[in-house]
Image (cartoon, grey):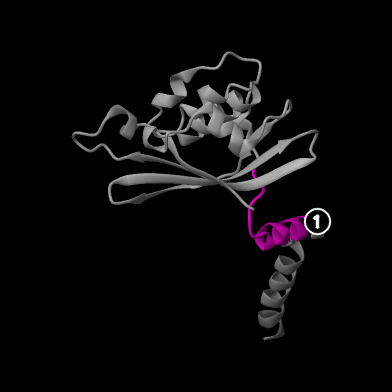
Amino acid sequence: MRLFLVIPCAALALAACSSQQPASDETDQVAAELDSSTPEPVVSDEDDVDTTAPLSSDALQERDNPRRVLAYISQAVAQHRLADAALAWRSEAEMTGALLEEQIGDYPDVKISFGDGETEGAAGTLYYTVPVALTADSGKMNRKGSITLSRVNDVPGATEEQLDWRVRQLTFDK
């Protein structure tokens, strides 16, 4: 009878000893990520922007991946081509290079980066909202906010622009 009880207890003890607990550094990192109210906006590796590459407006016809539009904006801003960056906005927003310059400033080393987001749908329109960070003036100027892109679902009668991912709104915290 004793052997009957000892074997399960020994197996349980071995299983407890061999289970892997996360290292305290990993636990602290996860806790910090959960505690932060706003994710830190960064461009992911897949969105790495080559600021020296020629700017391609192909992203402005994007219907699948809104991150391509964000990469286009990031590249255009880094190259100080704000009129081109403004093309990523919906036409009803009436965004221009001059208006965009008023919003982000005129710095020689301006960089705009974006966090992760999720696509959500409502009433036939898809929305993609992500945190945004603007850094300039050798890091002395930092602003955070959010940017929302949208596109209509494949609705009969929709225009080409309505079907493409375009910026609906860019706001920075005060």
Q: Position of residue 114 (x, y in %)?
A: 60, 40
Which quadrant holds the N terminus? bottom right
Where residue 9 appears, as percent x and y from the top left, is 70, 77
User: Who's the residue at 60% across and 29% down the image?
Assistant: 74
| Figure quadrant of residue 105 | top right
Residue 158 vertical placement versus 61 (above, below)? below
Q: Position of residue 166 (x, y in %)?
A: 42, 34
Q: Position of residue 71 (x, y in %)?
A: 56, 29
Q: Residue furthest bottom?
A: 1
**On the image, numbered disc 1 is attached to which residue?**
25
Q: Secondary structure at mark 1?
A: helix
Asked if residue 16 lies left or right of residue 161, the reply is: right
Position of 61 relative to 25 (above/below): above
Please tell me which residue is depicted at 64% across the width and 60% down the height of the picture.
37
- Give me the residue at 62% from left, 52% from top: 173
The crowding category of the residue bearing disc 1, from other C-alpha atoms within 10 Å (few below 14, some 14 to 19, many at least 20), is: few
Give the residue furthest to the top.
54
Q: Choose between 83 and 11: the one closer to the eye.
A: 83
| Nearest the eye: 93 or 50 | 93
- Residue 87 is one of the magenta-drawn residues: no
Q: Is residue 155 visible?
A: yes
Q: In the image, is residue 27 part of the stretch drawn in magenta?
A: yes
Disc 1 marks which amino acid?
A: Asp
Give the image quarter of residue 6.
Answer: bottom right
| Residue closest to the eye, 115 or 31 | 115
The answer, for residue 22, to whether it is visible in the render is no
Magenta segment:
25-41
Number of numbered discs: 1
